[in-house]
Image: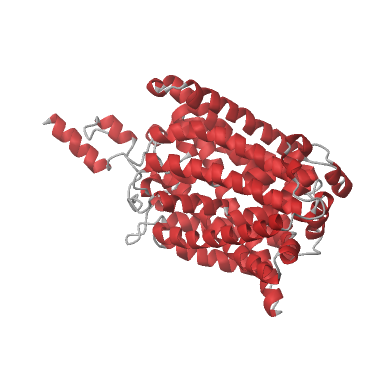
């Protein structure tokens, strides 16, 4: 990018007064991949999300992971092409702004920021549950799950204060342990030939998602929308690479490696482990094991098969790593939520104080503190309504992601349209019939279909159809998006300079003083 720019362009991209900059060049491709994959948290995804997926689809849960892998891989094709043209900490928000305009762009930015923040709250609920049950089983000391959630939030806030490279190292250590433990169980189940039905490979057949016998026998029906929710929830965070653009050494190259690596690698791993779960329990047994977990009869439907196929020592490893995995997952969402707040604040769309960084560590410290407050309020609200430790899992950690996943799917669908329009109008030289048109179009259809199934089947989540949150969360997602768009319309008429800042900042833009220096030099 040329350092010689006109003054209007400089004005349009000028950050909020007093805004800071994040730490340049702190992250390489491996570190970004650690941040993304640990955001998806393989162990937490499997231990928590496979039972939810089984709740919707019975033994056909692996088929839901197969569908999600295909949809998200196709989505990634256009997403990566867009990230090669636009490197921004704003991610989806910036992409949608560039492709569809500032009004839907800001609506998506507000919605996606909320989603990542409440994801952190939901995963902290899972952390509280697994920490409470594990520590009590080890020591006999019982403490409510919500207390552990708040302790973890305090530790997380401290990590966020320091530099991002430290966070990446912490997450990377947790990731290696998670993959090792799951792999040990997989080898044990396969070498034993599986459970009562052997290795259940027909669990990968997508047609089995609808009204299969095990789901009907145990749960009364199959809810494919809930199954897809559990599957798509397992990937949330794979799209984070552009959010770390400013802190990456080569953001355009890293985005491609990290996105494809996480989406396809996680997809294959999730399909394998969900097949292992179903095979270890058996077709009907898998649904029965999940029903027992949601009834509070076992801490996790994974623990009995770990003990049966490998021994009690593996259960202990599962318990310990579920604590570290859920913590790592929550921290990844926490970091991304803070970066959305930082991005919106730097562009003058949220209070300027949130755009200031720590002078020493160059971390978005103020934005991180804002996330801490929002997460604390969210957890407190759920705890007041549902105070038991089991509620931390089946209410806070299960209901909260429904809103977040719906929001993510909606924003990803908009992003598909934005990619298509951007390359048809603003970047015609980069247009490609598959990468920037057909793949985003197919991705859009897949996301919208998953959204419809999730909303239509949401009442099948553990008999929660009458709960107020289950009834209203689709409207909360829609209202958040509409409020963001209304704010953009307001800025357009009352603060055109701030309106021009929406989605304007890129990671490889020169600092404003450097840009102005170029203007003066050119004029001379």
Q: Give percent across and percent down for residue 509.
A: 31, 39
Q: In this view, does 395 lie above or below 444?
A: below
Tell me how many marks there are: 0
Comparing 153 with 484, the one in front is 153
> Tell me, what colour scheme is on the image?
secondary structure
Does 127 sit left or right of 308 as displayed?
left
- Residue pictured at 83% horizontal, 40% vertical: 212
Residue 270 appears in the picture as rendered: yes
Q: Give percent across and percent down for residue 75.
A: 55, 33
Q: Give percent across and percent down for residue 182.
A: 62, 58
- Residue pictured at 71% horizontal, 74% vertical: 137
Does 88 sit left or right of 521 as displayed?
right
Q: In this view, does 263 lie above or below 445?
A: below
- Residue pictured at 69% horizontal, 49% vertical: 274
Residue 472 appears in the picture as rendered: no
- Where's the N terminus, which quadrant? top left
Which residue ends up furthest to the left in the rendered image?
A: 524
- Residue pictured at 24% horizontal, 33% vertical: 2
């Amino acid at each position: 990018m040329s350092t010689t720019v006109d003054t209007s362009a400089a004005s349009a991209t000028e950050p909020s007064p007093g805004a800071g900059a994040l730490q340049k060049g702190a992250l390489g491709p491996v570190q970004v991949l650690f941040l993304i994959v640990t955001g998806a948290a393989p162990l937490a995804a499997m231990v928590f999300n496979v039972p939810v997926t089984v709740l919707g689809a019975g033994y056909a849960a692996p088929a839901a992971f197969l569908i999600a892998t295909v949809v998200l891989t196709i989505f990634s094709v256009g997403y990566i092409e867009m990230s090669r043209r636009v490197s921004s900490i704003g991610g989806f928000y910036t992409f949608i702004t560039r492709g569809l305009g500032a009004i839907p762009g800001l609506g998506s930015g507000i919605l996606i920021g909320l989603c990542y923040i409440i994801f952190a709250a939901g995963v902290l609920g899972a952390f509280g549950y697994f920490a409470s049950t594990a520590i009590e089983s080890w020591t006999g000391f019982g403490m409510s799950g919500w207390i552990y959630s708040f302790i973890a939030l305090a530790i997380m806030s401290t990590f966020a204060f320091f530099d991002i490279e430290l966070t990446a190292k912490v997450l990377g250590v947790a990731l290696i342990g998670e993959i090792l433990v799951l792999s040990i169980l997989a080898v044990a189940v396969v070498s034993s030939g599986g459970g009562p039905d052997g290795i259940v490979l027909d669990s990968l057949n997508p047609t089995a998602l609808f009204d299969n016998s095990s789901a009907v026998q145990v749960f009364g029906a199959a809810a494919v929308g809930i199954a897809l929710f559990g599957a798509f929830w397992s990937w949330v965070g794979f799209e984070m690479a552009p959010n770390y653009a400013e802190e990456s050494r080569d953001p355009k190259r890293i985005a491609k490696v990290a996105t494809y690596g996480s989406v396809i690698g996680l997809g294959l791993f999730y399909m394998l482990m969900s097949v292992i779960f179903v095979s270890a329990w058996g077709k009907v047994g898998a649904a029965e094991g999940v029903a027992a977990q949601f009834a509070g009869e076992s801490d996790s439907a994974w623990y009995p098969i770990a003990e049966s196929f490998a021994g009690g020592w593996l259960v202990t490893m599962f318990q310990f790593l579920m604590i570290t995995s859920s913590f790592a997952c929550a921290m990844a969402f926490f970091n991304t939520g803070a970066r959305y707040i930082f991005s919106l604040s730097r562009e003058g769309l949220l209070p300027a104080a949130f755009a200031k960084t720590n002078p020493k560590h160059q971390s978005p410290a103020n934005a991180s503190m804002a996330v801490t407050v929002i997460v604390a309020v969210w957890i407190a609200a759920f705890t007041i309504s549902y105070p038991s430790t089991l509620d931390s899992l089946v209410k806070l950690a299960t209901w909260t992601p429904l809103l977040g996943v719906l929001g993510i799917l909606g924003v990803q669908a908009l992003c598909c349209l934005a990619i298509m329009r951007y390359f048809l109008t603003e970047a015609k030289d980069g247009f490609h019939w598959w990468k920037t048109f057909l793949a985003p179009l197919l991705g859009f259809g897949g996301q919208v279909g998953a959204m419809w199934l999730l909303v239509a089947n949401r009442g099948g989540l553990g008999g929660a159809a009458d709960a107020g949150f289950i009834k209203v969360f689709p409207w909360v997602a829609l209202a958040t998006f509409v409020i963001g768009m209304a704010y953009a319309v307001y800025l357009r008429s009352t603060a055109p300079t701030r309106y021009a800042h929406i989605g304007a900042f890129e990671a490889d833009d020169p600092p404003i003083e450097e840009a102005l220096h170029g203007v003066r030099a050119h004029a001379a």
